[in-house]
Image: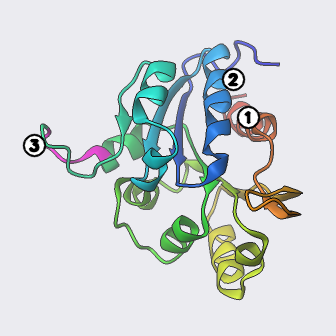
Amino acid sequence: MANKNLRNKKILIGVTGGIAIYKICTLVRLFIKSSAQVKVVMTENATKFVAPMTFQTLTGFPTYVSSFPPTDFNCLDHINLANWADIFILAPATANTIGKIANGIGDNLLTTVILALPEKISLIIAPAMNVNMWKNIFLQENIRKLQKRKNCYIIGPTIGMLAEGIKAKGRMVEVEEIFQLAKKIILKKTG
């Protein structure tokens, strides 16, 4: 269960365009119930699954999608968000986004935030994808690259029902597991 020992901790959650995105609303609520501050960064594809307004309503903060918002002449959201966070959680993490960050590609706001994260900030990645995508040799190479980053934690995927209706490895771990890992990392750093 959630509790108050994450008071004022800054949780930055990056969401990508996978069907498991609907679970992230529950993850956000777990952090809010623990008195943490939560901000969400979405890829454009993620907005096709869940509207940015949903996360804005849950968190009380704007939801960040565009690298170049039309009303912001500063355009340093990627730096400001990276420096704001106590921890970054990428969930669900698609094969596409995993490939981009593993290879230093920052072609959207979410990937540039991750590239701008100070190494001391922990990065939790919760993959979610089709079993064949998960087993793909290139994806596995990218996972190994990410594991070389200091303070990077890959959690899952697990075996379960996938979007295409088969039971296989590729399902995102449950949000409670992500929450507990993040809580453990944060409390270890502050405790």
Q: Are the two marked residues, 3 and 1, in contact with CB atoms closer than 8 angstroms? A: no
Image location (x, y in percent) of residue 40: 47, 37
Give the image quarter of residue 51: top left
Quadrant placement of the C terminus: top right
Give the image quarter of residue 96: bottom right
Q: Are the two marked residues, 3 and 2, in contact with CB atoms closer than 8 angstroms? A: no
What's the distance in space between the residues labelled 3 and 1, CA to CA? 35 Å
The residue where tag 3 is placed is 73
Give the residue displayed 73% in from the left and 32% down from the top. 183
Does residue 53 sit above or below 43 in this rendering? Answer: above
The residue where tag 2 is placed is 30
> Quick one: 57 or 120, which is closer to the camera?
57
Tag of residue 179: 1
Q: Amino acid at mark 1?
A: Phe
Give the residue displayed 29% in from the left and 49% down from the top. 66
Disc 1: CA contacts within 10 A as few (<14), some (14-19) or many (>=20): some
Dot 2: element: helix
> Quick one: 134 or 151, which is closer to the camera?
134
Identify the mark nearer the N-term, 3 or 1: 3
Dot 3: element: loop
What's the distance in space between the residues labelled 3 and 2, CA to CA? 34 Å
Identify the mark nearer the N-term, 1 or 2: 2
Residue stretch rendered in magenta on the structure: 72-77
Quadrant placement of the N terminus: top right
Membership of 75 in magenta stretch: yes
Give the image quarter of residue 143: bottom right
Q: Is residue 123 visible?
A: no
> Quick one: 142 or 69, which is closer to the camera?
69
Image location (x, y in percent) of residue 107: 34, 67
Disc 2: CA contacts within 10 A as few (<14), some (14-19) or many (>=20): some
